[in-house]
Amino acid sequence: MSNGITPEQDERNKRLIAHTLYGAQLLGIYRRNPMQEMLLNEGTPEERQVYVARKMRLYGAIAVLVLGYMAYGYFSPGPARPLPVAPEMVDAGMVKDVQLHDSTFTTSTTVTTSVGVYQVHGGVSASAGDSVKLKIQKEPIPLRSLCVESQIKSVCYSLL
């Protein structure tokens, strides 16, 4: 035993140095390091202890960096989401006529206004003279609706 390094510790250090050589050769990262060869064959136990301690600090620092990078990726917020875009409301005139089309499986309504004719899903409750607006939503998905502002109720109906 020299300077507090037991023969078992020295053998452990030799194995670590030898495995470092072997692992690096398998990965093809670099060729044999002459310093490692010298440490294995001619070095003192103290030199091997210093070398192994330096390598362990290096590997520990690399592990901390990798784990820190992974933690940063996990805990960092993603890209900022854009603010929602308000739907566009276009005047579609006044209601002139409402015709209900009821079939076995669906119900639709044709709404005739002073500006145009619109077909919507479902039954529309409106009367002549009620105000109509066309609602155009671009996000999250494009959607067009006909909004009827009547005295009974104000509701938007999706266009066919």
Image (cartoon, rainbow, N blue to C red):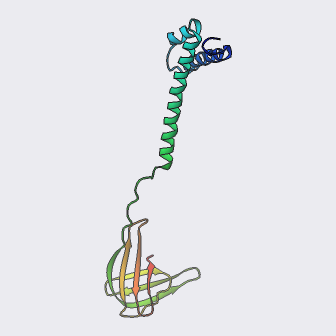
For the residue pair 73 and 159, the one nearer the viewer reads as 73
For the residue pair 28 and 20, the one nearer the viewer reads as 20
Q: Residue at x 41, y 93 (%)?
A: 151
* As drawn, 126 above or below 157: below
Q: Residue at x 51, y 47 (%)?
A: 74
Q: Residue at x 56, y 8 (%)?
A: 43
Quadrant (top left, top right, bottom left, bottom right) of the N terminus = top right
The picture places residue 115, in percent across and down from the top left corner, at 31, 84
* As drawn, 41 above or below 91: above
Quadrant (top left, top right, bottom left, bottom right) of the C terminus = bottom left
* As drawn, 14 above or below 121: above
The picture places residue 141, in percent across and down from the top left corner, at 43, 66
Q: Residue at x 57, y 19 (%)?
A: 20
Outermost residue, front side: 3
The picture places residue 38, in percent across and down from the top left corner, at 54, 8
Res 146 quadrant in image: bottom left
Res 44 quadrant in image: top right
Task: Please tell me how many numbered marks the rendered image carries.
Answer: 0
The picture places residue 91, in percent across and down from the top left corner, at 31, 81
Outermost residue, top side: 42
**Left/right of residue 73 with respect to residue 133 in the rendered view:** right
For the residue pair 110 and 26, the one nearer the viewer reads as 26
